[in-house]
Image (cartoon, rainbow, N blue to C red):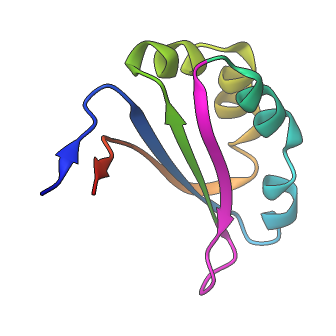
Amino acid sequence: MTRKDTVQVVCVAEFRALEGKTDAHRSAPFIDQATTAEPGCIRYELNQRVDDDRWITFIEKWKDQKAFDEHCAMPYIKHFFDDVRPPLVEDFAVKLFQEILP
């Protein structure tokens, strides 16, 4: 039987870098350092697709929706989406999940 954690929030954010911009997009260290320092951050991963290295995926786990909402309101996140992302990223999707535990 499985059970669902209905409190924690898992964010999967996928970004496809513009041609020639993969390294610049992948090396935005201000995001990971600041994110992992937030008190509600449980997990933070940065992954790159094997079949298309232009796709970078952030996987984050937050203690609850409030912690995730506070993260999204951080100035460095707004700066990333408003200023850093547009010249680096061709396409992106941000999806929220609840983890299903075994």
Which quarter of the image is occupied by the C terminus? bottom left
x%, y% of residue 52? Answer: 62, 81
Judge whether 76 appears above or below 59 on screen. above
Front residue of 13 and 41: 41
Q: Quadrant of residue 2?
A: bottom left
Residue 36 lies within the magenta run: no
Given residues 60 and 85, the one toward you in this image is: 60
Using the image, determine if residue 75 lies above or below residue 34. Answer: above
Residue 16: % across, % down: 61, 63
Q: Is residue 64 toward the left or the right of residue 28 in the image?
A: left
Q: Measuring 56% from the left and 21% from the top, which residue is drawn there?
A: 72
Horizontal relation, residue 13 to residue 26: left or right: left
Residue at 75% over, 52% down: 88
* Residue 24 horizontal side relative to residue 5, left or right: right
Q: Is residue 19 left or right of residue 63?
A: right
Which residue does the image show at 66% across and 63% down from the upper left?
47
Tell me the residue at 28%/36% (across/down).
Answer: 5
Q: To which quarter of the image does residue 84 belong?
A: top right
Up-down: is 59 above or below 65?
A: below
| Magenta part of the chain | 40-55
